[in-house]
Image (cartoon, helix red, strand yellow):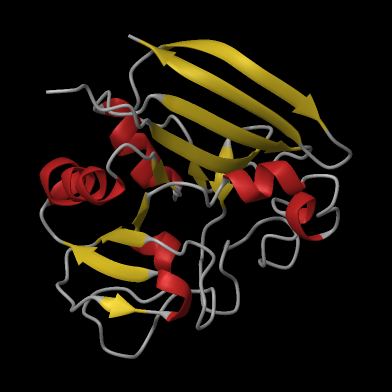
Amino acid sequence: MNARTGKVICDLTVSVDGYAAGFNQSEERPFGDDGADGTGSLLHAWMFDTPEENRAEAEQMTEAGAFLMGRNMFGPVRGAWDRPWNGWWGDDPPFHAPVFVLTHHARDPQPMDGGTTFHFVTDGIRGGALDRARAVAGDGDVSIMGGATTANQYLAAGLVDELRLHIAPFTLGAGTRLFDGVPGMKLEQLRVRSASLVTHVTYRVVR
């Protein structure tokens, strides 16, 4: 049997002090108290204010064969699915591939326009979500899109091959932080590129 060639990639935007979102997420404030207006305008200005400068990195974020994300990354609804919610991205999300959402509350798959289907997984980060994502991705990559809590679970379990960080030039001071609860690890820097509103750094996780 041939070895699988696809990687498990974690792709996140963080502040200089490592936060991927502030507290108090809501439908109006998808990134919580982010030091600006809660829309992620500081964290994600590189994507929206300077898109041409960062086109390659933005496009690379959605090139995987399958995606993983936590419940908070998918939306602000907590507990049981007591109201309609199909993500922040409208009828045609940018993934165009299966997306496996980690949750404690079962829900039927939600197909969207453009080839994206959200699958809601209740049996953990490995067997339920990652194995299914790998199966549909084939030799393609599996991308962990966030949030930081989900990324930390996969990092702590030693399941991430490559870490792509987009570091925004400000400090947030509080919120959900990358590497919280993650044991020490060695990283090999593969690429770095500075732009006006962000520094893109790619690491390989050394095992």
Q: Is residue 18 visible?
A: yes
In this view, 101 is above or below 195? below
- In the image, taking residue 68 as reference, residue 179 lies left or right, namely right
Can residue 174 be spotted in the picture?
no
In-front residue for pair 1/103: 1
**Residue that appears at 59% across and 25% down:** 202
Q: How many marks?
A: 0
Residue 18, x across and y down, in percent = 58, 34
Q: Residue furthest right?
A: 196
Q: Residue at x 44, y 44 (%)?
A: 148
Left or right, 70 with respect to 130, comes to: right
- Front in this rendered view, residue 205 or 98: 98
Looking at the rendering, which quadrant does residue 138 occupy?
top left
Q: Image quadrant for the N terminus?
A: top left
Residue 170, placed above or below residue 123? above
Q: Quadrant of residue 199?
A: top right
Residue 4 position, x and y percent, is: 25, 27
Q: Residue at x 48, y 17 (%)?
A: 204
Classify the position of the C terminus by image quarter.
Answer: top left
Q: Position of residue 117 (x, y in %)?
A: 33, 71
